[in-house]
Amino acid sequence: MLTRRDALGLLAGAAALPSRAFADYAKPRGDIRTDLAKFFTDAGTEGTFVGYKVEDYLLISSDSNRSGEPKLPASTFKIPNSLIALETGVVGDPDKDVFKWDGVKHNNEAWNKDHTLRSAIAASVVPVYQEIARRIGPERMQKYVDLLDYGNHNIGGGIDQFWLTGDMRIDPVQQIDFVDRLRRRVLPVSKRAQDLVVDILPVTKVGDVVIRAKTGLTDRDHGQLGWLVGWAEKGGADTVFALNLDVREPRHIADRMTISQACLSAIGAI
């Protein structure tokens, strides 16, 4: 796992120990692209974008500060939560196992119905994933969070709240570390679980480029932070990325994808 110090060292172009994400490759170069910050400014917000161009061994960031700041993962934790659910058998089949709606009305209408794992990650259904976390339980959850080397490993604050309002924190470079290991299917869980999670990740197509990525959004009491993490597939070249931004206005929710695509385009990933 890249520590904040390692991340800033890489992004400054200094020598730093490679993380597990980069263990199979030459040590990546770091590049600060301050021109990328303009996409956030033009949208009327602040944020950070980090991209890892796998074929070029190049880690690119819009800045050298926020890119290393740990934040609540919010619904980006649905990625490891799905892996753990499949690995432990809490979910056997992402298309057949059904989570019944409990009848509690939510403002998001997409949450007010039954869901499978596939539909729940597509609609980012928080209550389903809270139920999944409760079924996994604290002991198994801690075991797998440690095994996956995810963020700061801290599941304090409630088994169904730690990634939303609790003690879990992860920075953008750590997000890339984790997602890249999933992309390469080298996480310490079964290949089946990894294949299934990659398959159910939401997909956005931009021309011939496929973006597999998960959103996240904290509530107003916890910073109203928006995430998008995943990777872009362009032919045989992949770029793993993580973006977070301050959601100051409702339109900034959609800007997670808009700005990510703008940054990916600027670095030649789409």
Image (tube, grey):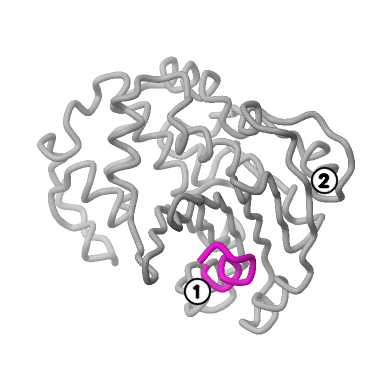
Closest to the observer, 76 or 130: 76
Q: Which residue is mark 2?
A: 8
- Tell me if residue 243 comes above or below residue 250 in the rendering: above
- Tell me if residue 131 comes above or below residue 48 in the rendering: above
Q: Which residue is mark 1?
A: 258
Residue at x-position 61% and y-position 51%: 53
Residue at x-position 80% and y-position 36%: 6
Amino acid at circle 1? Thr
Percent coordinates x, y for residue 9 in the rendering: 85, 42
- Tell me if residue 182 comes above or below residue 186 in the rendering: below
Mark 1 lies on a secondary structure that is helix
The residue sitting at the front extreme is 236
Query: Dot 2, crowdedness within 10 Å: few (<14), some or many (≥20)?
Result: many
Residue at x-position 32% and y-position 40%: 129
* Magenta-colored segment: predominant secondary structure: helix
- Tell me if residue 6 comes above or below residue 148 in the rendering: below
Mark 2 lies on a secondary structure that is helix
Query: Dot 1, crowdedness within 10 Å: few (<14), some or many (≥20)?
Result: some
Q: Earlier in the sequence, mark 2 or mark 1?
A: 2
Percent coordinates x, y for residue 34 in the rendering: 79, 69
Residue at x-position 66% and y-position 44%: 173
Q: Is residue 133 left or right of residue 260?
A: left
Percent coordinates x, y for residue 182 in the rendering: 46, 34
Q: Which residues are magenta?
A: 261-270
